[in-house]
Structure formats: structure tokens, C-alpha cells
Image: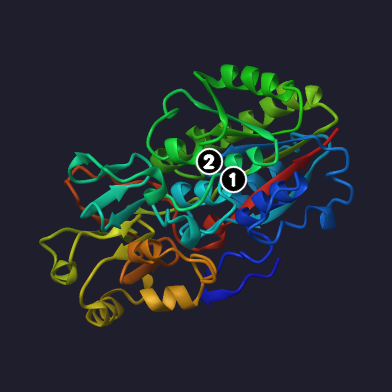
Amino acid sequence: MLLEKIDQGLFKPDYENFSLVNLSNFVLKHFNAQINHAPYPLERFVPGVSNGVEKIVFFLIDALGMSSLERILNRDRVFQEYVVLEATSVFPTTTSAAITSLLTASTPIEHGVLGYILYIRQLGTLLNMIELSSPIMGKVTSTLSSKELMFEKTLFEKLLEVGVKSFVLTSKTIRGSGLSTLINVGASIRSYQSFGDMFAKFREILQEEGPSFSFVYWGLLDSIGHKLGVSSDAFESELYWLLRMLSREILPVLPRNVLLIVLGDHGQIFTPWERETWWSWKDEVSMYFSVPPGGEMRMMHIYTNQPQAVIEYLGEKYRDRALVLTKEQSLNERLFGDLASVHAASIERIGDVVLIAKENYSFYFKYTGKEESLKSKHGSLTLEELLVPLMIFRR
């Protein structure tokens, strides 16, 4: 997979063939549903992989980047037989944008979830797109419908239209919360309370009758990476035992008519505290902001009435730390996806200036003053964040 470079060390997602968007379109095509984009060409790399498949299962491990998987497999093979392919995440490389893309088969510019924190004009405030709350005010009373927050049908709804049922298995702590209420529409939702409970219910889903698509989500790896670092013993141990449990508890009972794909939504990169930039309303840069920045710590949506002044200011102060683009430049580069089918409200959510952190730099804005430094982060377009594995399993 050849990726187009946009700056030193930064690359574009491959929405043409090899992104998470294309992978979910592979699912739509397999079940004869209408596709939005070209399907990921799995058959090119694993001929016959979908022959006789009645069920497709995605097991998504949040923050599973290609580089992290390679470290584990280089230390211990774990599986007897497997095929590992690469895919790109989306931009920004963050859970809200990436999983929404995967579960709508559409790009961020199409579905409208363009980052972790976005300015929603109809609400007149920033909105945390995971919790659907304000990072400043907390819970937001909103009259907006789900279709005004996310502009695409879910993958589950699209499959239901052709008679294919779907299942979601997720943690009890996030079932029915925030973004989950938007992206799980159309699926039968089940939840687990623990590591072992997740694998037990995973096996139950495999035994469901009839054609189906299932999405199993494990989110703890991402939390460990943020708190302890992507190269920490805890991160690598968590990933190793997830894969070992998969090998022991799922693969031996995987029905022959099931295609299982283990994947990540984005990777993480170690971000030392000495390369962090912290902003607040007391800093000079804030004089350009119309509202606090959105996005995340490795990618910011900067909302301003003076985009050119911001570009010049950031170029002078932070040239080595970030690539800074106008909204128009980010759209022309198709970082959020192709412009052929775009909702106007989606474009409004993009910052007038888009900041993309280089190397292992990061940027914080103090919304409340209670923000904490994280050891590893994501959101930018380095290979560590952008490349995710697709582990293909058939019996």
C-alpha cells in the first residue's frame, strides 16, 4: 500500500481502496447491499476468503495500530495460521471518527463526526462527540435529532434493508451512552462486564442462526496507552493476552461459515510531556479564537474569524511542531474524504484552521483546567497512528 505524503512524516488516509471505510463496504457488497465506496480488495490478497461466508465478525481492539501488533507477533507468534493485511484509519485518527466511519461505511466528511470535540453551530457550543456533552458545561440539553448529529445511516441499518441482521457486543459501561446511541442503530446490542464475559458472549454470537454481521468492541487497550504509554509493559501485556484468549477461546470454535477480522481503529504514538504545548485564554494565540479549539491533542479544529492571521502566527511560532492548513486546504487535500457527497453542516464543523501535530508533539487547550497529560496519543497522520492491522481468520 503506497500512501500519499502531505508533509514530512504525515500521510493521507487511502479512502480509494484500503481504509476502514472500504472494509465496511466490503461487508455491504458481500451481503448484496448498496455500497458507498469501493470495497477493500480482500480477495486480491486472500483468494476465496469470502467463499461460503454467511457471517462476518469484526473484533475491534481500540488503539490497535500495526506497529503495536508487529511488536507482539515478533516476540510470540500467538496464532498458528493467520493473514495480516494493512488498512488506514481515517482523519482524524481518533475513535469517534474512525468507528463512525467503520459503522456507516462512509468517510468523516459524509457522516459528520469529524473528531473528538466539534463546534456544533445549531447548539452554539463545543460538543464531545463520544459523550455528546460539552467539555466546558457538561451535559447539553439538545433538540437536535440523531440525524442532525450524524448524517449517514449505520452499517446495521443498511444491512437490515437486505434482510441481514446485526449484533453489537460492547462494554456495559458504554452501552447506550453518547456516540453509541448513534452508531449502533439497527443492531441487536449486547454487553459484557469483564474480560471473560466478553469472550463467553462472543462465542454465543457466533452460534446465531442465519446471515449476520457482528461488531465486537474492546476499549481498554486505548485507555492503558493513554495513561501508561503505548510501549508500556501493561499495554503490551493487555494486547498479548487479548490475542492469546482469542486464539484459545474463539478460533477453535469458529464456525466454517464465519469470516473473522480482528482490527484496530487507529494506533497511538508516545508523546513526551516536554513536547506538549498548553494553551488557555491567557495565551496570546487565544486572541484569534472565536470559540475554544476542537479536535484532539494531536489534531485541532481552530475556529476563528482570522484564518490567515492564525496561519501566520502558528507558522512563526510552531512551524516545527505542526502542519497548519486552512479549512479549504484540508478539503482540497481530501483529508476528511472526497467532496462528491458532502453535507453543508459537516463542513461547518471543520475548523477554519486545521492543525496537525508533527512527530510526537501535542497541543492542549485548557477548557476547565482539569485536563491531564497523556503519555500516548493519536489524531494526527503519522504511520503509527494511521496504519491499522486486519487479521483475517477462516477455518
Q: Quadrant of the C terminus?
A: top right
SS for dot 1: loop
> Would you say 234 lies left or right of 123 here?
right
| Residue displayed at 67% across by 60% down | 18
Q: Which of 71 and 392 is in front in this view?
A: 392
Provide residue 234's location: percent of width, then percent of height. 50, 33
In the rendered image, which quarter is residue 257 located in?
top right
Amino acid at pointer 1 = Gly
> Would you say 54 lies left or right of 156 here?
right
Q: Is residue 326 visible?
A: no
Location of residue 8 with respect to 181 vertically, above or below: below
Provide residue 295's location: percent of width, then percent of height. 35, 57
SS for dot 2: loop
**How far separated are the C-alphas under marks 2 and 1?**
6 Å
Provide residue 123's location: percent of width, then percent of height. 23, 51
Provide residue 263's location: percent of width, then percent of height. 64, 44
| Residue displayed at 39% across by 46% down | 375
| Residue displayed at 32% across by 55% down | 118
Which mark is first along the chain, 1 or 2? 2
Q: Are marks 2 and 1 in contact (CB under 8 Å)?
A: yes
Marking on residue 205: none
> Would you say 40 lies left or right of 121 here?
right
Q: Is residue 136 visible?
A: yes
Location of residue 166 with respect to 124 vertically, above or below: above
Circle 1 Cα neighbour tier, 10 Å, few/some/many (<14 / 14–19 / ≥20): many
Task: Look at mark 1 in the image and give the residue it sits on.
Answer: 264
Marking on residue 62: 2
Amino acid at pointer 2 = Asp
Q: In which quarter of the image is the N terminus?
A: bottom right
Q: How many numbered marks does the figure carry?
A: 2
